[in-house]
């Protein structure tokens, strides 16, 4: 009597959806950045005194820097996901599990 059982866990590919989700986040952040740039232009054209303008512009620029660092972080993560998904064999080796049972009587 021979009983053989082989099962392999499959590697799910959620990287594609994660990648598009990150792209969507990047687009949202870029839209916010553009809005902040417009606010800076509006502030520069406002009738506020020089000190008030400078303070408001500085705050807006800090927000833009924060957004840019978030965008850069998302792009870096996106690129590393694309590199790992370009080698599906490596993904399967690291994500799949194997159970092999061989009973001989």
Image: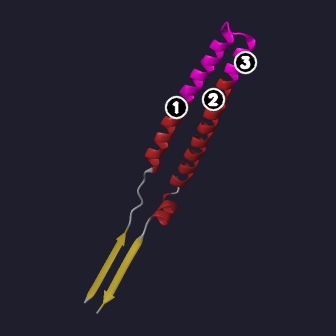
Which label number is shown at residue 27?
1
**Is 46 left or right of 101, judged from the image as shown?**
right
Element on which disc 1 rests? helix
Tell me which corner region of the image, top left, top right, bottom left or bottom right, holds residue 61: top right
Separation of residues labelled 3 and 1 (CA atoms): 28 Å
Neighbour tally class for label 3: few under 14, some 14-19, many 20 plus, Cα within 10 Å: some
Q: Nearer the viewer, mark 3 or mark 1?
A: 3
> For residue 63, which numbered disc appears in the image?
2
Which residue is rendered at x = 60% and y = 38% of the image? 70
**Quick one: label 2 or label 3, which is nearer the N terminus?**
3
Measured Cα–Cα span from mark 1 to mark 2:
16 Å
Percent x, y of residue 83: 56, 51
Label 2, label 3: how many angstroms apart (C-alpha)? 14 Å
Tag 3–tag 1 contact (CB < 8 Å): no
- Mark 1 or 2: in front is 2
Question: 9 left or right of 1?
Answer: right
Residue hosting label 3? 54
Q: Residues within 10 Å of mark 2 (few under 14, many from 20)?
A: some
Name the element at disc 3. helix
8 within the magenta span: no
Q: Residue at x 60, y 17 (%)?
A: 38
Q: Give the quarter of the figure containing the N terminus.
A: bottom left
Q: Position of residue 24 (x, y in %)?
A: 48, 35
**Would you say the magenta stretch is mainly helix, strand or loop?**
helix
**Segment colored magenta:** 30-58
């Amino acid at each position: 009597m021979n009983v053989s059982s082989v099962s392999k866990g499959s590697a799910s590919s959620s990287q594609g959806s994660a990648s598009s989700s990150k792209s969507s986040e990047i687009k949202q952040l870029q839209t916010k950045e553009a809005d902040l740039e417009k606010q800076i232009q509006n502030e520069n054209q406002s009738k506020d005194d020089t000190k008030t303008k400078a303070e408001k512009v500085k705050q807006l620029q800090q927000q833009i820097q924060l957004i840019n660092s978030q965008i850069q972080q998302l792009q870096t993560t996106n690129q590393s996901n694309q590199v790992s998904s370009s080698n599906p064999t490596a993904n399967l080796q690291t994500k799949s599990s194997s159970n092999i049972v061989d009973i001989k009587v």
